[in-house]
Amino acid sequence: MGRERQRVDYLRISVTDRCNLRCRYCLPSEGVPTVPHAEVLRHEEIVAIVQAAVAVGIKKVRLTGGEPLVRRGIVELVAMLAAVPGIDDVALTTNGVLFPEMAAALKRAGLRRVNISLDTLRPERYAWITRGGDLQRVLTAVETALALGLHPVKLNMVVLKGFNDDEIIDMARLSLERPLHVRFIELMPFGPADALQNECFFPTREVRARLEAHFGPLVTIRKLAGCGPACYYRIPGATGTIGFISGVTGHFCSRCNRLRLTATGELRTCLFGGPGVDLKGPLRAGANQAAVAALLREAIEKKAGTRAKTGRLGVMARLGG
Ligand SMILES: Nc1nc2c(ncn2[C@@H]2O[C@H](COP(=O)(O)OP(=O)(O)OP(=O)(O)O)[C@@H](O)[C@H]2O)c(=O)[nH]1
Ligand SMILES: C[S@@+](CC[C@H](N)C(=O)[O-])C[C@H]1O[C@@H](n2cnc3c(N)ncnc32)[C@H](O)[C@@H]1O
Ligand code: SF4
Ligand code: SF4
């Protein structure tokens, strides 16, 4: 008997390829050539694709980027997506820089939860890894998300040997008193991260060993809202959790539940590449919802429960992580 196919119910949407930071493992210092405005999907086009996606089983959307909060009208887009019948979860992955001022409006628009990238708790390190970012803004973003009752609030830390691996315990401590979910992410070989892989890759098993040497055995917990690739644990007695995203050493592809939509309207069935399907062309040529749904259905049927094999990987800021 064949393997039962994982239900695909989650669409990650990169709403822009632009970013207000230049994290060293994600973008080159000069950035990447930006896509002309006309090539980027308009709000209405994203909504049309999401409506078609609901017809093929999508229930959750996550907005990412680039930095999703630099997209003009992002609050309105959240409201439009939250209003699509059949969508029960609208989430955001952000670097947090613009979040404090926008958070209340985003929540009012229907944002349910947020994942915030935070690689270090030291201001000078943060400025270095992001090429100029201000740590205080991200810390304020985390506080704002908690104060607004967005739930769960997850933190994303890409662990880099020799840069922030000495902060693993400090980051994990953030989960002790408050409902913060601290995720340790393995560096994946995209764009500039490819060149860092040899020197900086720090595997999940070593993160876990460090945590257990300090806090004692971690307790396995059932998954948090999100159904992403993270595996969650708890430090005994902690309010929040610890998550591991093992994009390199892990084996979670057989339960992959997601599709990706790039800012320019290409549908991808795997972060690691594979054939993309152009949705913008058909949409602009007048394809109706049923026709877009048929393209989505076909892509889902072809989606393998394994990582796509590809010669060249793009940059994360283009794919939305
Ligand atoms: N290999 C792989 N990595 C992923 C996948 N989805 C997300 N990631 C990585 O996981 C990290 C965190 O991603 P987030 O955008 O916070 O999303 P998430 O953890 O999937 O989201 P939720 O589970 O919904 O909270 C990023 O480094 C992503 O690149 C995936 O399908 N495959
Ligand atoms: C590409 S960013 C886009 C959203 C937003 N700009 C942010 O930083 O949260 C999404 C996530 O991918 C992670 N990421 C970027 N490059 C990565 C890499 N090479 N390996 C693993 N994770 C990476 C980031 O740390 C971030 O948590
Ligand atoms: S990880 Fe996010 S914040 Fe950092 S450069 Fe990439 S897209 Fe921008
Ligand atoms: S690597 Fe590809 S198939 Fe595997 S979990 Fe990520 S997106 Fe899904």
Image (cartoon, rainbow, N blue to C red):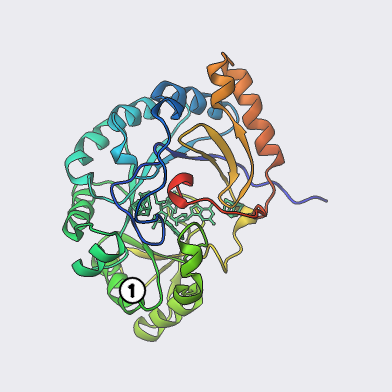
Height in image: 232 above or below 272?
Answer: below
| Drawn side of residue 304 relative to residue 246, left or right | right
Height in image: 33 above or below 139?
Answer: above
Q: Nearer the viewer, residue 284 or 75?
A: 284
Q: Quadrant of residue 214?
A: bottom left
User: x, y (%) of residue 187?
Assistant: 47, 65
Q: Please, what secondary structure does the residue beneath circle 1 have?
A: loop
Q: Quadrant of residue 23?
A: bottom left
| Residue in the image at 41% along x and 31% along y | 36
User: x, y (%) of residue 320?
Assistant: 45, 46
User: x, y (%) of residue 126?
Assistant: 25, 64
User: x, y (%) of residue 22?
Assistant: 33, 54
In the image, farthest residue toward the bottom: 213
| Residue in the image at 21% along x and 39% along y | 102
Height in image: 115 above or below 194?
Answer: above
In the image, farthest residue toward the right: 1
User: What is the crowding at mark 1: few (fewer than 14 residues within 10 Å), some, or many (at least 20)?
Assistant: many
- Count the marks: 1
| Residue in the image at 39% along x and 79% along y | 211
Height in image: 74 above or below 152?
Answer: above
Three-letter amino acid code at the position of disc 1: Asn
Label 1 residue near ligand 2, CB within 8 Å: no
Q: Nearer the viewer, residue 257 or 162?
A: 162
Residue 304 in sight from this viewpoint: yes
| Residue in the image at 41% along x and 61% along y | 25
Residue 122 in sight from this viewpoint: no
- Residue position for label 1: 164
